Structures are given as structure tokens and as C-alpha cells.
Amino acid sequence: MGASRKLQGEIDRVLNKVQEGVDILDRIWNKGYDTDKANQKENFEADFEEEIKKLQRYRDQIKTWIQPSQINDKVNASYKQGLVDARKQIEHEMERFKTCDKETKIKAFSKEGLAQQPKTDPTEKTKSETVDCWNNEVGELESQIDNFEAKIEGLSAL
């Protein structure tokens, strides 16, 4: 019984560390994409890589726990599902790192760099979406006005 509780405590600790790591990666990811300066992006990528390596070590530990003989005997199924979810979360972050790494390795004037869509400033994107939304609303209201005017003309002709 004591070994089982010890294992559950260790699993809880690793799951908490994984969640903390994912939260840190989210902050790094957002900061990295909010900046336009190449040297800052490289710094964020280095931080991202460092944190990914920590998560990969946790992932290796989780994989050993998930093996049927390891966890089924000692820990209940809810822990197993939590471990599977944590492993998937780490693998998702690893994919994000691949994307980040690939993007920072692309030179601005290479074929790939020139083929990329220009990045829009988040505030400009929000502004553009808001303007589009209001333009759609105005268009809809103008259409309703035209319909009401047509109805009024139809009624006044009677």
C-alpha cells in the first residue's frame, strides 16, 4: 500500500510539473509571436527548447508508467488517463516547437521566406476583423432599409 501511495504522489508531482511546463510554453509562445525582432525571437526559441527538453524527460517517465505492468497493478485507471492526457499534451507542445524551430530557421529572403504570408500585427488583425464585422452589419441594415422602403411604397400605392 505504501509503494502505491508513493507512486501516486510521484505521478501527481510529475503531472503538476507537466502542467506548469505547458503554461510556461504558452507564455513563451505568445511572447515569441508578439515580437517582430529576430534576436528576441531567437531568445524565445531557446527558452522554448529548454522547456521542451524538460517536458520530454517527463514524457519518458510517463511512458514507463503507462506500460500495462507498471501502472495497472499499482494505480487506478483515473491516474492512467491523466498520464495519457499529459503525454499527449507534451507531444502537442513538441509539434509546436517543431513549427517554431522551422519558422525561425527560415531566412527572410529565401524561397520559403518569400513564399510565406506576411505576418499581421495582432492589433491590426483585430481592427480589421472589427471593421469587417461592422461593414457586414451596416450592409445588413441597408438591406433591411431597402426592404422596408419597398414595403412602404407598396402600401402607399394602394
Image: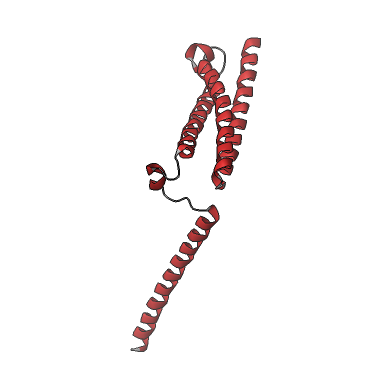
The x and y percentages for residue 106 are: 44, 39
Q: In the figure, is residue 75 to the left or right of 135?
A: right
Quarter of the picture containing the N terminus is: top right
Residue drawn at x 57%, y 35% is: 25
* Outermost residue toward the front in this view: 109
Residue 86 appears in the rendering: yes
Total marks shown come to: 0
The x and y percentages for residue 58 are: 56, 22
Q: Which of 70 and 97 is in front in this view?
A: 97
The x and y percentages for residue 62 are: 54, 20
Residue drawn at x 50%, y 33% is: 97
The x and y percentages for residue 147 are: 38, 76
Residue drawn at x 62%, y 31% is: 20
Quarter of the picture containing the C terminus is: bottom left
Q: Is residue 117 above or below residue 105?
A: below
Residue drawn at x 44%, y 51% is: 118
The image's colour scheme reads secondary structure
Which quadrant of the structure image shows residue 76? top right
Q: Which of 59 and 137 is in front in this view?
A: 59
Q: Nearer the viewer, residue 37 or 85?
A: 37
Q: In this view, does 65 lie above or below 105?
A: above
Q: Which of 66 and 59 is in front in this view?
A: 59
Q: In this view, does 155 lie above or below 36?
A: below
Q: In the figure, is residue 13 to the left or right of 115?
A: right
Which quadrant of the structure image shows residue 17? top right
Residue 1 appears in the rendering: no
Q: In the figure, is residue 44 to the left or right of 94?
A: right
Q: Is residue 11 above or below residue 94?
A: above
* Outermost residue toward the bottom in this view: 157
